[in-house]
Image: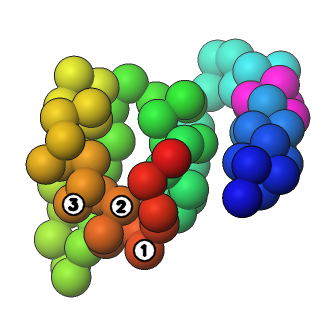
Amino acid sequence: ASDVYKRQDEYIDMFLRVLNEEAEGHIVIVTTGIFAMAKRIAKDVLVLSNGEINEVTYEMIDIPEIKKAIFDILGELEE
C-alpha cells in the first residue's frame, strides 16, 4: 500500500507543478476523487454526494467525523 501512496504523491506533485505554471491569472476548477489531491491543492473543497453539494473548509477537513464521511463518499481508505 505504501507504494500506492508514494506514486499518488508523485502524481500530485507533478500535477501541482503543471497547475502552478499554467494557472497564473486564471480561474481553475479541478475535479478529483482523490482526497489527498483535493486537500493539497485547495483551501476549501466542495463534496458532491447524491446530488448535494457540501463545502468543507480547510479547518474542517481534519475533524475525524467529517474526514471519515469524505472517505466514505469517495470510497477511499484513510491515509
Query: Amino acid type of disc 1?
Result: Gly
**Decide: marks 3, 2 in contact (CB < 8 A)?**
yes
> In this figure, which colouring scheme has been used for the structure?
rainbow
| Helix, strand or loop under label 2 | helix
Q: What's the mark number on residue 69?
A: 3
Residue 17 is covered by the magenta coloring = yes
Q: Is residue 27 visible?
A: no
**Which one is in front, 60 or 19?**
60
Q: Which residue corresponds to mark 2? A: 71
User: Marks 3 and 1, how far apart in space?
Assistant: 10 Å
Q: Specify the segment rendered in magenta.
A: 14-19
* In the image, residue 64 above or below residue 74: above
* In the image, residue 16 above or below residue 67: above
| Spot occupied by residue 33 in the image (x, y as percentages of width and height) | 52, 63
Q: Residue at x 64, y 17 (%)?
A: 25
User: Marks 1 and 2, how far apart in space?
Assistant: 6 Å
Residue at the bottom extreme of this rendering: 50
Q: Which residue corresponds to mark 1? A: 75
| Helix, strand or loop under label 1 | loop
* Quadrant in the picture for the N terminus: bottom right
